[in-house]
């Protein structure tokens, strides 16, 4: 069984360290992994939140590769959400 709590702590610690070292590309990659973890956990709302945070960071860093990746991940995450009845 995967220890997601421990992984979450590692992601948080890594994100804090990358931020303190002003390593934007590393922060972006960490957010990508963090969001993927939430998808695996089935926490789609949290994944979307993390992917949007990564998208914003990719835009401000002018990282078009990750802009595209985050947009695709957000679309995939929304596809996993149950359709709301109107």
Image (cartoon, rainbow, N blue to C red):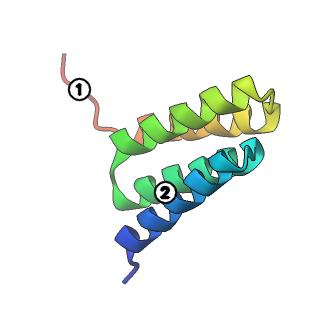
Residue lying farthest bottom? 1
Q: Residues within 10 Å of mark 2 (few under 14, many from 20)?
A: some
Q: How crowded is mark 1: few (under 14 residues within 10 Å), some or many (20 or more)?
A: few
Residue lying farthest top? 86
Q: What element carries label 1?
A: loop
Residue 45 point in image, percent of width and height: 34, 39
Quadrant in the rendering for residue 68: top right
In space, the residues marked 2 and 1 are separated at their CA atoms by 32 Å
Q: Which residue is drawn at 37% across and 43% down?
A: 46
Residue 33 point in image, percent of width and height: 58, 56
Say whether residue 37 is left or right of residue 65.
Answer: left
Residue 12 point in image, percent of width and height: 49, 57
Q: Quadrant of the C terminus?
A: top left
Q: Is the residue 20 above or below the residue 37 in the image?
A: above
Q: Residue at x 62, y 56 (%)?
A: 17
Residue 80 point in image, percent of width and height: 39, 43
Q: What element carries label 2?
A: helix
Residue 12: give its label. 2
Residue lying farthest left? 85
The residue where tag 1 is placed is: 84
Quadrant in the rendering for residue 22: top right
Say whether residue 36 is left or right of residue 85.
Answer: right
Q: In which quarter of the image is the N terminus?
A: bottom left
């Amino acid at each position: 069984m995967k220890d997601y709590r421990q992984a979450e702590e590692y992601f948080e610690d890594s994100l804090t360290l990358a931020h303190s070292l002003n390593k934007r590309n590393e922060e972006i990659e960490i957010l990508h992994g963090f969001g993927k973890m939430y998808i695996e956990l089935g926490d789609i709302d949290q994944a979307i939140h993390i992917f949007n945070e990564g998208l914003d960071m990719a835009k401000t860093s002018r990282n078009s590769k990750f802009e595209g990746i985050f947009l695709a991940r957000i679309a995939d995450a929304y596809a996993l959400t149950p359709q709301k009845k109107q």
